[in-house]
Amino acid sequence: MPADHPRLHGPEVPRAGTGIVHLGLGAFYRAHGAIYFAEAMKASGGDWGIVGVSLVRPDQRDLLRPQNFAYSAVELGPDGEMPQVISIINDVLVAPEDPQAVLDAMSAPTTRIVTLTVTEKGYCHEPSTGRLNRDHPDIRHDLANASAPKSTIGFLVRALERRRGEGTRPFTVLCCDNLPENGRVVRGIVLEFAGLVDGGLAEWIAAEVAFPSTMVDRIVPATKPEDIERLAGRTGVLDRSPVIHEPFRQWVVEDNFVDGVRPDLGAVGVELVADVTPYEHMKLRCLNGTHSSLAYLGYLAGHETISDTVADPVFAAFVRHLWNSEIVPVLQAPPGVDLGAYTNSLFERYANPAIRHRTWQIAMDGSQKLPQRILGTVLENLTAGRVPKGLILAIAAWMRYVGGRDEKGEPIDVRDPLATELKALSDSADSAEKTVEALLGVGKIFPSELAGHAAFREALIESHRGLIEKGAREMTKDVTNA
Ligand code: CS2
């Protein structure tokens, strides 16, 4: 066993004071936002150290604490591995163990930004409408328990309530999740919850709190035990919780912060713009939309990772077809962006064989991802009089996937907040027609304009039947050969 790395423990790395509380301390944030903030402090100073909060499990805190919350971020590019040590995290709190400590950190006057990566399902909203799900057990709990929230929304509102009571300026809420117009959506959910607590509080939040929208991008596969071993072997030191990422990164942020207070993000390549919406749509539809499509179809076809999937010529042609014929034609390019060049660079990123991003990982939480990644594009094609067969095949593949059996009849470990409901609906149907009918009826996912669209429904049934009869790879081939 290699020795622990002194820099991962060492007091020699001077720590900045805390200016940011981050909810949902996963690998993505540690490989993206945290690195930008560390670089911004290096470039221009400021007390922008981070207190991370795990909302569910203590694992990250337990792994990071012995290394004084420092960790390696390992870039996997064409020139090999490039690790660097990131030491911007000052502490990690585990919300279920001590929710009061989390509220204390969020209420501290020195905390000026609360960043969020709690994944799509962490907002306790309805993906098809963007509204708060008032029946969510955590929301019900948080409405009744002011001092011990469980949900992200509960923590945000209760901490803002406390700041208002104490006469402290509010923090900026900076959402870094893959939701369209993520700041606006989170603002709406927070205001709805706050309105149920106290109308005056909701008004204060509406007037005083900033919720800038952001587009975040970097491919960060889950760290695997072999990554930890390889890094330890290479450096001779043991990091128990490194993060692995591709070289590419992008962050587009709406420049709207409470009192204009923020780190010098412009100095480190963050694009500060007035309207993030076109960037968000581009990224969610071109990247995440094809990621999910490749994930369901690739998984069913027996491919383990995205790079394996696009190494198969059938899927390489398919993903280019999705971009060129189904996604880009209904997309408005952000100012100065060439969508052809953008999608070519996405292909290169997917093909990077060093990034072992599992189709199974991306397939998680499909019920929360499909609307903003795929369904909007489908609807816009239908409105323009085209039936986008490739994306419809991807939706059919998701329907097959949530049924829980792969093409060899083996069980699929489906992870999704609606997994039980989706499986029950699938099990109750004994034909492609009935499966499609049952799953299209889930209004939390499919808006009625789509569910009731005859040509869409027909194409979906045909694709689903084809998946059962011919399999994912053959059906994928048919889309590009048509
Ligand atoms: C992926 C994203 O897991 C997923 O659903 O599509 O995490 C993707 O890798 C990132 O959004 C890239 O920026």
Image (spheres, helix red, strand yellow):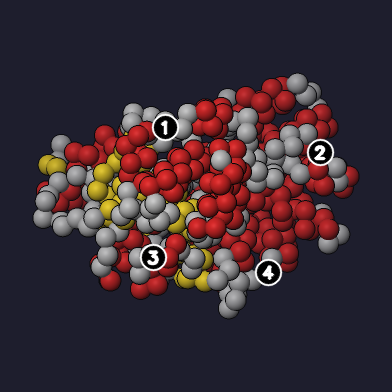
- Sequence-wise, which precedes: disc 2 or disc 4? 4
Residue type at mark 4: give it: Gln
Residue type at mark 1: give it: Ser
Seen from the viewer's position, the closer of residues 311 and 98 is 98
Label 2 – label 4 distance at C-alpha: 30 Å
Q: Secondary structure at mark 1?
A: loop
Q: Which mark is residue 332?
A: 4
Q: Nearer the viewer, mark 4 or mark 3?
A: 3
Residue at 52% in and 71% down: 273
Quadrant of the rendering where the N terminus is positioned: top left
- Sequence-wise, which precedes: disc 2 or disc 3? 3
Quadrant of the rendering where the C terminus is positioned: bottom right
Q: Nearer the viewer, mark 2 or mark 3?
A: 3
Residue type at mark 2: give it: Ile
Label 4 – label 3 distance at C-alpha: 31 Å
**Residue linked to disc 2:** 461
Q: Which mark is residue 261?
A: 3
Q: Nearer the viewer, mark 3 or mark 1?
A: 1
Q: Confirm or deny contact between disc 1 and disc 2 (CB under 8 A).
A: no
Q: Secondary structure at mark 4?
A: loop
- Is residue 362 shown to the viewer in this render? no
Q: Confirm or deny contact between disc 3 and disc 1 (CB under 8 A).
A: no
- Sequence-wise, which precedes: disc 4 or disc 1? 1
